[in-house]
Image (cartoon, coloured by chain):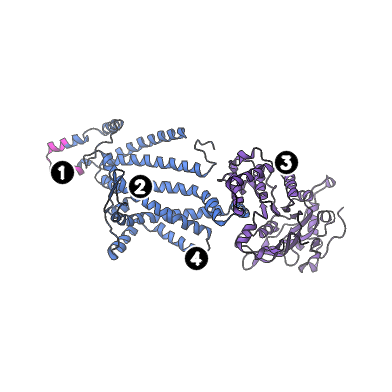
Amino acid sequence: MITTLIRRAIQAGFVVIAMTLIVFIGVNVIGNPVDILINPDLNQAERLRVIENLGLDQSLWRQYLSFLHGLTQGSFGDSFVYGRPALDVILERLPATLELALCAMVIAIVVGLPLGLYAGLYPDRVSSKLIMTGSILGFSLPTFWVGLMFILVFAVQLGWLPSNGRGDTAEFLGARWSFLTGDGLSHLLLPALNLALFKTSLILRLTRAGVQEVVMQDFVKFARAKGLRENRIILVHILKNLMIPVVTIIGLEFGSLIAFSVVTESIFGWPGMGKLIIDSINLLDRPVIVAYLMMMVVLFVSLNFIIDICYTLLDPRVRLDGKG
Amino acid sequence: MTPLLDVRDLVTTFPGRGRALRAVDEVSFQLGRGEVLGLVGESGSGKSVTGFSIMGLVDAPGRVASGQILFDGEDLAQLDAETRRSLRGRRIAMVFQDPMMTLNPVLRIGTQMTETLHAHEKLSAAEARARARDALGLVGIPSPQERLDAYPHEFSGGMRQRVAIAIALLHRPDLIIADEPTTALDVTIQAQIISEFQKLTEEQGTSVIWITHDLAIVSGLADRIAVMYGGRIVEAGTITEVLTAPRHPYTRGLIRSVPSENTRGTRLAQIPGVTPGLGRMPEGCAFRTRCPRATEVCSERPGRFGDAMAYHRCFHPHEEALA
């Protein structure tokens, strides 16, 4: 277990280094931050001073080395745009994204798993076919379009829910959260539903496919032959076997919700990290981009590790040391 | 005395193209208490479906279309789902063919045993565990206490089948349906399991329907035998009657095709042709297209000749004993 953890950490380290190199070169190829960041009204001397302050007068590899040096001091560099440590800029956006992602994921699981179970257990019922048809819609309608429709219907036409921003927030664990206030919740609902729609369909279809595979197995028939009640067969025998692929998807999709909710956050003006990273890319704010992507690498590596631990809990045949 | 199980004209159908296919076709047999019936036939002859019909576990869209399954005088086919569930595992248990597949891979052996007890009885977790442990010990699993916490993949195939048998025996059922329980095992393990199974069911006075394609196993195990072909029982009787003087040409062909001391050095007899699929069974006697004795009359459906305990379905039965 510990050795696996260390091995994963080392692998993550290599991924981070490769990723930072790519970002440094990539941003350099896209354009010169100087052209975007510096007020064209400044005179040449001021211009040079700003460039020097940002460290952009150095060659690319020198900039990279000083970035690495900064890392060893625990610094990710200062944002070109905000002039503050890049990590702080990102972290203050984290709660917004985190609560949106969590909320969407909970909706997706709470709705997708039972519906998928139902559609898998009773595939011939009309209701199951309706569910599956609905899931195709949820699967194939583009997120931005659904988001716009949500705003059009619920915010503009019906006027039930707000369409922009986080609303009131309350402090909890040193950060500000929307889900703790009624107003915040009403702001959270539409973007969370928007994000959840695709994930719900994904979990639903995966669950259904899993159920149909598992119910064919002899051990389900044997469980019936033992005279077990249907509830126990479904909730213990079928569900536990089914959770292995579902947990994988839940984990990875949760990561992608945190990292890539750009579209939804933009449409609903949700001040989360997705909006930040898109703005940063537009402004070529390299320290923020690098710090953000490094966080995401760590996030995905951690999620994968948690998924692996879940495997060992769900399936006794799986061992983390790879010998099982 | 009424027999424990009295199956009368059981028909189990599966929907086919345009018409219902009869996987089990007017099957009738009786089974007394403590008796062992060998249900013999090739793959696809309907023997497993017969077993599942009695259990009430025919996979949809298949269903028991007609006939009676009188268990202790009560027609199982008429019972509601909950009553049938309460019989399953408690009074009628089943052991499956492939021990690698019958136990749930993600649940501990102990859990899979105690849940069976909890499904039918009110008892504490500790009592259930103790009963499960004793049952494991009974089927010859060493250090049963520790093994309760093991998972199926930590057992060999033979051991898993012992666990399955232990689960089947937990409630001292009146009837066990054993669906080829040794087919997937090594020959040496086969012999051990059969003899232990035999010993345990004899001790508990359990009736057994032993489903197999292996005449050799049945001959050493069963009191009576029923031979199935194309969904019908073509011949039924005591083991000695049927094996020494088979009446139906199919039974005869089946016995002839088993290698024995007497046939050493000669070419093994075989039944010509292959079993037609369910959808292509000939009208009348299902065996007539492969039968050397078939005549015009065989295109009519042969009835049962004989009584409920010993009968055959053939217009041209053999009269003489096997050489």
In the rendered structure, which segment of residues is drawn in magenta? A36-49
Residue B320 location, quadrant: bottom right
The percent coordinates of residue B193 (x first, y second) are 71, 44
Please name the residue that numbered disc 3 is placed on: B188
Please name the residue that numbered disc 2 is placed on: A258
Q: What amino acid is found at the position of numbered circle 4 in the picture?
A: Val
For residue A309, say whether it is visible.
yes
- Labels 4 and 1 in the same subunit: yes
Label 2 residue SS? helix
Tell me the tag on residue A96: none
The percent coordinates of residue A319 (x first, y second) are 52, 38
Chain shown blue: that is A
Say whether residue A44 is magenta: yes
Please name the residue that numbered disc 4 is placed on: A126
Q: What amino acid is found at the position of numbered circle 1 in the picture?
A: Asn
Q: What amino acid is found at the position of numbered circle 3 in the picture?
A: Thr
Say whether residue B291 is magenta: no
